[in-house]
Amino acid sequence: MIDLSHAEKHIHCVTNFQDLVSTPFVGEMNAICWTRTLAGDFSEIVKKVALSGNITVIEQEELCELQLSEQGQLAREILLNDLEILKAYGASPVLNVIKHYDRDDTYPFFPTDVYSFHVDRSPIPTDTFLCTYYGEASEILPNAQGTKKVLIPEIREKLKKLYDGPDEGFESFLSEHFFDLHYQAAPDARPVSLGLGNLWRLAVDHPGSQVPPCLHRAPDEKPGENRLLMIC
């Protein structure tokens, strides 16, 4: 179950895909969850996929060719159905087995990898969809519990020294290097785990958006346990 006791205004739950995609974001609500308890053995799929690095994309053809037990077949049918309904909606879902993402240590005081709370940005209206089927689940954070890092004085000063250019170009520098997409959680912040099997729709920073973009991050993986994630 998802603990929403501290995030009611932030998250809205639905019981089917149509409501997931048709419910508008309003006010503080910028995350919608289709709550699901899924049958099947998704770990079997993770174990049988031929890995090709830290992140392996599972193509639909490969997924269909896997030799699976009855429980594995149930899991596969759910994955194929999720791919189908998202594609029919117009999204471009990708199914990944993730050992881990690359860490960004370019600027030790300001990592810009997906383990940092961040928002997604798009030049056109869109949303982010994601579902964790196996492994550690992603997390989101109510916007009131995060501060844009580029607005924190000590961090901003370090970024200005890093930039070392004319004042009028500083904001563009922050955007070009994605610094302005990242947030620092408050000391008393309470991130919400997205849980296993739930299909989420998160608000994105795009022109015309009526709500703040959703703050989210990838979890720290458990050693030896790969994640199975669909995202688009």
Image (spheres, helix red, strand yellow):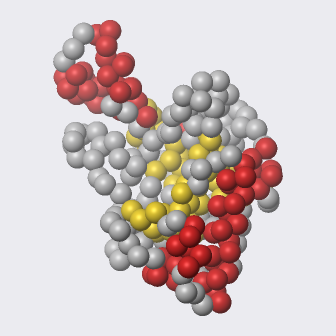
x then y, percent, for residue 121: 51, 34
Q: Is residue 83 above or below residue 122?
A: below
Q: Is residue 90 visible?
A: yes
**Closer to the camera, 59 or 81?**
59
x then y, percent, for residue 26: 73, 34
Q: Quadrant of the N terminus?
A: bottom right
Horizontal relation, residue 226 to residue 208: left or right: left
Horizontal relation, residue 212 to residue 50: left or right: right
Horizontal relation, residue 66 to residue 101: left or right: right
In this figure, what is the number of numbered marks? Answer: 0
x then y, percent, for residue 219: 43, 59
Seen at 37% across and 33% down, the residue is 178
x then y, percent, for residue 129: 61, 51
Seen at 35% across and 68% down, the residue is 52
Q: Is residue 171 above or below residue 3?
A: above
Q: Which of the 4 quarters of the picture holds residue 153?
A: top left
Q: Is residue 41 above or below residue 149?
A: below
Q: Is residue 33 visible?
A: no
Seen at 64% across and 83% down, the residue is 73
Seen at 25% across and 26% down, the residue is 159
**Closer to the camera, 134 or 215?**
134
**Closer to the camera, 99 or 111?**
99
Considering every residue shown, the one lying at the far bottom of the view is 69
**Closer to the camera, 67 or 210?**
67
